[in-house]
Image (cartoon, rainbow, N blue to C red):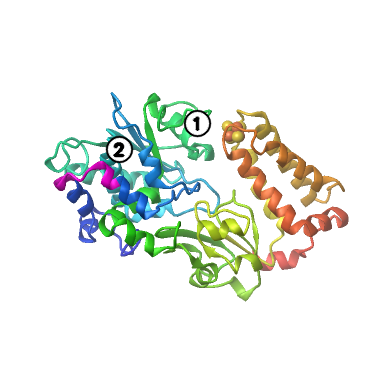
Amino acid sequence: MILAGCDGDRTWRLQDYVARGGYAALRRIVAEKIPQDTIIGELKTSVLRGRGGAGFPTGLKWSFMPRSFPGDKYLACNSDEGEPGTFKDRDILRYNPHSVIEGMAIAAYAMGAARGYNYIHGEIFEVYQRFEEALAEARTAGLIGQNILGSDFSFELFAHHGYGAYICGEETALLESIEGKKGQPRFKPPFPASYGLYGKPTTINNTETFASVPFIMNMGGEAFLNLGKPNNGGMKLFSVSGHVNRPGNYEIPLGTPFSELLEMAGGMRGGRKLKAVIPGGSSAPVVPGSVMMDCTMDYDSISKAGSMLGSGAVIVMDETTCMVKALERLSYFYFEESCGQCTPCREGTGWLYRVVHRIENGLGRPDDLDLLNSVTANIMGRTICALGDAASMPVQSFVKHFGAEFEYHIENKKCLVPPEVQRAGS
Ligand code: SF4
């Protein structure tokens, strides 16, 4: 759907997007003056769930925007994409940026927003430049700006690049960053729908979410829903990385068996055995390979397996993986990226990293696993934003499912997976 036909050099160009049916939905909405409620109703029917990680129903989120607000309302697209394992949004912006522009224009029409910003991860600058070029094309063609397509609907859209801080992908930190302040999350409530960018009502959606909107408006909410399964409408992009033969982005219907996705990604590298999968980006709990093989790729099935679909970043690990070392790297990431505003996260993420680091380096203590569980329990639910939980959930799940490997490290001062086996898989 979003990346279909996007395998040439010029697929990002306006001309190519229009040839693929692009901007037909926006043209129809503007020409027929389709009521805002009809558009939001179509989104609700589609059960498009937010593709950034939280999985919140998009139509419902749009309905939270106040209708009769005396002043500007804003839209923000979250293209910050800093979650380890996730690399789908940058490909949407690289190969099909106009789907995001059209999706944002339709969203602006449906919610009465006057201005929008696409916040793009700062470490992929060429993607930001490409989006700017696509914006210029859309502006010249009268698809954004004043009096879009000769109508009385106006919407200004701007690109904004971040500087690589993971926390700026948190929606309120993203707003702070657009405002030119330090990117730190705000207390909620108030929620952005009532007090967002510059204190005005704001709706924030992920890149893939906005990019899905034109397709829903063209095919209808019901048809989109039926592509997936009940409560899990449509297609979804999955970024598959790790020990597979063909890592990359795969756009598949929600509800597709994990085993099929693994096959699309070329199967396990070297024919090795699947050990574990992180199915939804590094914040999602790890799932043992045997459990994962019975899952389908949708929000409900992954949740039943004790994890989250998240952003759809599927990290595949084979039997050569040392789970202690894997967790050490993840824990360092969260320690490094904590914004430091709240004590449980600022101190706790460092504490988690140091304990896992010492276990990995043969200095673990007998009560370290209890300590890890205790520290995570004291972080979760006690922080301003979800980073504290995101740092804790991997630790809890690694210890729960692979505790024997951690205990072996502590008792024997070395890894259960011999170094030569680890090297073979690296
Ligand atoms: Fe910052 Fe962590 Fe608190 Fe989030 S949980 S506001 S990242 S210190």
As drawn, is 93 to the left or to the right of 250? left
Residue 113 image label: none
* Residue 211 placement (x, y as % from top left): 34, 51
Give the CA separation, mark 1 to mark 2: 26 Å
Per the rendered image, the range of residues in magenta is 30-39
Callout 2 secondary element: helix
Question: In this figure, which residue is indicated by the disc labeled 2?
Answer: 111
Residue density around tag 2, few if under 14, some if 14–19, many if 20 or more, within 10 Å: many
Amino acid type, mark 2: Met
Residue extending farthest to the left is: 150
Which of the image's four quarters has the N terminus?
Answer: bottom left
Which of the image's four quarters has the C terminus?
Answer: bottom right
Q: Chief secondary structure of the magenta span?
A: helix
Q: To which quarter of the image does residue 113 belong?
A: top left
Please say whether residue 37 is one of the residues in the magenta stretch: yes
Sequence-wise, the earlier of marks 1 and 2 is 2
Amino acid type, mark 1: Gly
Please say whether residue 426 is one of the residues in the magenta stretch: no
* Residue 107 placement (x, y as % from top left): 30, 43
Residue 72 in view of the camera: yes
Q: Is residue 373 above or below residue 320?
A: above
Residue density around tag 1, few if under 14, some if 14–19, many if 20 or more, within 10 Å: many
* Residue 341 placement (x, y as % from top left): 60, 28
* Residue 164 placement (x, y as % from top left): 49, 40
Q: Is residue 337 above or below residue 45?
A: above
The response on whether ligand 1 sits within 8 Å of label 2 is no
Question: In this figure, which residue is indicated by the disc labeled 1?
Answer: 183
Q: Residue at x 51, y 45 (%)?
A: 82
